[in-house]
């Protein structure tokens, strides 16, 4: 177990589902990577069906790689895959809007 001290940092690991949010703060050694922090958080034990190594990962909304070194108070975010391509979604909304306007 890592204890808080001069050479340790605190980071949060976050993952959100529609009905549930995983948010865990861990104390980790200075120089820890994103991959090591996620493993230390035991995310894989709670979500065994999710291959987090193939998901997009970010720190405060900015995409990073698994080997990125964390700083004190960083929040590592594990992103879910998009349900729908944003471009396709805009096309669908546009078609619905034009169809509705043409019926008026």
Image (cartoon, grey):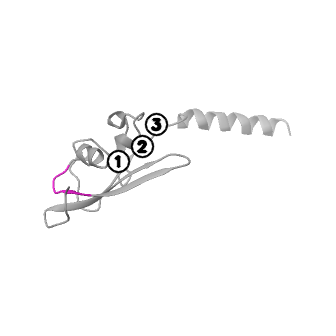
The residue labelled by disc 2 is 79
Q: Position of residue 55 (x, y in %)?
A: 37, 37
Q: Residue at 37% across / 49% down in the picture?
A: 77
Q: Which residue is mark 1?
A: 58
- Crowding around mark 3 (Cα neighbors within 10 Å: few <14, some 14 to 19, many 20+) is few
Q: Residue furthest bottom?
A: 6
Quadrant for residue 103, please give it: top right
- The C terminus: image quadrant: top right
Which is more N-terminal, label 1 or label 3?
A: 1
Q: In the rendering, at what x and y percent does residue 83 appear? A: 54, 35
- Residue 25 percent across, percent down from the top left: 33, 58
Earlier residue among tags 2 and 1 = 1
Residue 29 belongs to the span the image colors magenta? yes
Q: Which residues are magenta?
A: 27-32
Relative to 102, does residue 29 appear above or below in the rendering?
Answer: below
Cβ atoms at labels 2 and 3 below 8 Å apart: yes
Q: Quadrant of the N terminus?
A: bottom left
**Residue drawn 54% across and 37% down?**
86
Instruction: Tell whether 9 sits left or right of 22.
Output: left
The answer to if 72 sits in the magenta stretch is no
| Label pair 3/1, CB-CB below 8 angstroms | no
Please say if the residues under marks 2 and 1 sit with CB atoms less than 8 Å apart: yes
């Amino acid at each position: 177990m890592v204890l808080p001290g001069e050479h340790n940092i605190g980071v949060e690991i976050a993952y959100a589902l529609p009905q549930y949010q995983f948010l865990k703060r861990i104390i980790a050694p200075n120089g820890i990577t994103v991959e090591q922090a996620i493993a230390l958080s035991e995310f894989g034990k709670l979500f065994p069906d999710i291959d987090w190594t193939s998901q997009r990962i970010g720190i405060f909304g900015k995409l990073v790689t698994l080997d990125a070194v964390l700083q004190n108070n960083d929040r590592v975010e594990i992103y879910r895959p998009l349900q729908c391509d944003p471009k396709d979604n805009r096309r669908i909304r546009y078609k619905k809007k034009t169809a509705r306007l043409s019926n008026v």
